[in-house]
Image (cartoon, rainbow, N blue to C red):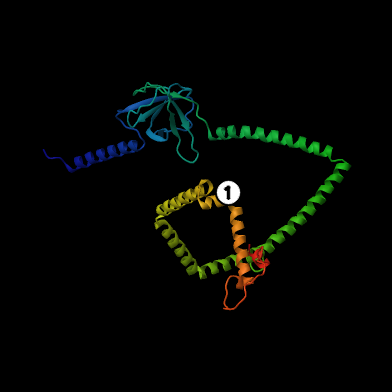
Amino acid sequence: MRVSNETKVGALTVIAVTLIILGFNFLKGKTFFKSGSFLYAKYTDTKGLIVSNPVFVNGFQVGTVFEIENMNDNLSELVVCIKLNQLYKIPKNSVATIQENPLGTNAINIVPGNSTMMVLSGDTIKTAPAASLLGDFMNTLSPLGEQIKNTITSLEKVLGNVNKTLDDENRQNFKVILANLSTTTANLDKSIQSVEGMLNKQNGSIAKTADNINSFTANLNQNNQKISNILTNLDSTTKSIKDADLNKTIKDIQTALVALNTTINKLNNGNGTAAKLLNDPNMYTQLQSTIKSVNTLVDDIKVHPKRYVSLSVFGKKDKSVPLAKPLSDSLAHD
């Protein structure tokens, strides 16, 4: 059986119209085959909510508004059908509120609860009255307006007290305070000028200090080689001291100190001549007497040499009296 061209054109037209209708409804979020996961929310005012508006949980879009149904003739109860992209784990005590957006699209925001039981497809979720932006703004302004009112009242009280306080005497005192404040301001201006003078790039004291620092730095740079040589010599000296056999030197010093202590003990406690000379007063006296006698003999030889040495065959014997004590110059040497 042969199909006519008119039949083909009619069939294609029907298919095209059907696809257009299905596509339009799909873009609106509505399908003819109600399948998937759905939740229901009852409101008395949907705030202009329409089909295909988004549904969010914690800012994440979980679905769209599938349809809105009127449950009675006076429109006092409206049921919103929410189609979920998938069956998410949403606690049963969660609350769905409508968010108004004057500049965009209204949406449903589901605030998760703390229940351990999760919603199932077909459950009705709790709702709360939708808060308008103007209402939120007014709620925010109400405490602020009350604070402003209290502040104005306090300011009026302060101004009243100031008017009562500013009698003639207090006004005069206030003038004195203002005069002192003016003087203080003038002194502060002078101080600022002094600071500016100090900070002057050419003649200020800070500039001079900076010049001195620069000069000192320049001298350090010029004598850098000398300083390096000094540090090198110091390092060499330190290394020499480090490398020296200090332990042996210390042992030698200790040995010498032991020998010195032994000698001193012998001088203090021994029986030798040196010990007796140091410790026995009689020994010292006898030694002094002997030295004196020797000096006397030497001086007598000087004064009367003929008595001890005879150089003449016919010389006479010197009969002069010998010296009884040393001469004064010998005594001076004692």
User: Which residue is at the far left?
Assistant: 1
Residue type, mark 1 in image: Asp
SS state under label 1: loop
Residue at coordinates 71% horizontally, 61% vertically from top-left?
194
Residue 142 position, x and y percent, is 62, 32
Residue 264 position, x and y percent, is 51, 49
Q: Is residue 283 visible?
A: yes
In the image, taking residue 313 as reference, residue 262 lies left or right, namely left
User: Which residue is at the far front?
Assistant: 314
Residue at coordinates 49% horizontally, 27% vertically from top-left?
45
Front residue of 157/128: it is 157
Residue 283 position, x and y percent, is 58, 52
User: Which residue is at the far right?
Assistant: 168
In the image, taking residue 8 as reference, residue 128 lies left or right, namely right
Q: Quadrant of the C terminus?
A: bottom right
Instruction: Tell me where residue 153 sits by quadrant.
Output: top right
Front residue of 30/242: it is 242
Number of marks in the rendered image: 1
In the image, taking residue 4 as reference, residue 157 lies left or right, namely right
Residue at coordinates 65% horizontally, 34% vertically from top-left?
145
Front residue of 116/87: it is 116
Instruction: Tell me where residue 13 sits by quadrant.
Output: top left
Badge 1: residue crowd in 10 Å (few <14, some 14–19, many ≥20)? few
The vertical placement of 272 against 60, above or below, is below
Q: Quadrant of the N terminus?
A: top left
Residue 25 position, x and y percent, is 34, 35
The vertical placement of 42 against 214, above or below, is above
Front residue of 256/320: it is 320
The vertical placement of 315 against 65, above or below, is below
Name the residue tied to disc 1.
280
Residue at coordinates 76% horizontally, 56% vertically from top-left?
187
